[in-house]
Amino acid sequence: MATKDPRIDAYIARSAAFAKPILKHLRKVVHTGCPGVVETMKWSMPHFDYKGVMCGMAAFKEHCAFGFWKADLILDTGESREKSGMGSFGCIRSLADLPNEKTLIAYVKKAAALNEAGVKAPGRKQPKKRKPLPMPADLNAALKKDAKARKTFESFSPSHRREYIEWITEAKREETRKDRLAKTLKWLAEGKARNWKYMPAKK
């Protein structure tokens, strides 16, 4: 028996105008492909479970995302998983960015069948530990003058610090580097990670 979660209704209602038809379509497709699906919220995003986690969707400022938990076992070879953006289909800005409804329903049915059979997701290789990047002198000097930004930076995980350091040091021109440094200080003072634009909005 399928269940609908009112929190997902509220999530869709709060989403941007462009995102609403995408989220409603994805929701309908999942229920069509798996009549016994159970809706829930995980990590502040709508998810669909059937004998385990099956798939999930999310809306951001300028795009949506939709992904299968066992995508490597579900999607056709060469599917658009290589696109930028989270999820199995990259950045979804309109229904045209998704496979057709029949194909999506087939994916959902396959995902449900895998969970029904108790098939586990392929093991992921442990990423190699990367050495911490040296602190750029200009960033270090700027953080010393800005206590608020420094406090945020020091509270970040090594990976979040690395994102900012790489962004600054990869600038090709001096003007670009200065601009990125200024934005870094501003975002850090606001408590934001480098890729804050792609993170789910706090509800």
Image: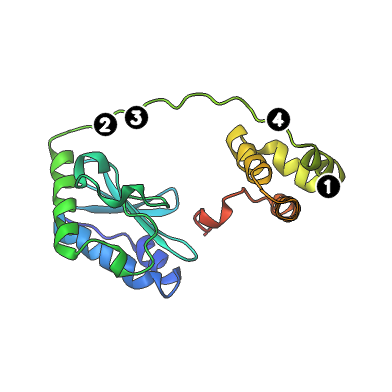
| Residue matched to label 3 | 124
Q: Nearer the viewer, residue 128 or 8?
A: 128
| Residue matched to label 1 | 146
**Disc 4 vs disc 1: Cβ atoms closer than 8 Å?**
no
Mark 3 falls on what kind of element?
loop
Which residue occupies the extreme bottom position in the image? 17
Dot in front, 4 or 3? 4
The amino acid sitting under disc 3 is Arg
| Residue matched to label 2 | 122
The amino acid sitting under disc 2 is Pro
| Residue matched to label 4 | 134
Mark 2 falls on what kind of element?
loop
- The mark nearer the N terminus, 4 or 3, is 3
- The mark nearer the N terminus, 1 or 3, is 3
- Return the x and y of residue 59 as percentages of the image width and height: 42, 62
Distance, label 4 to label 2, CA atoms, is 35 Å
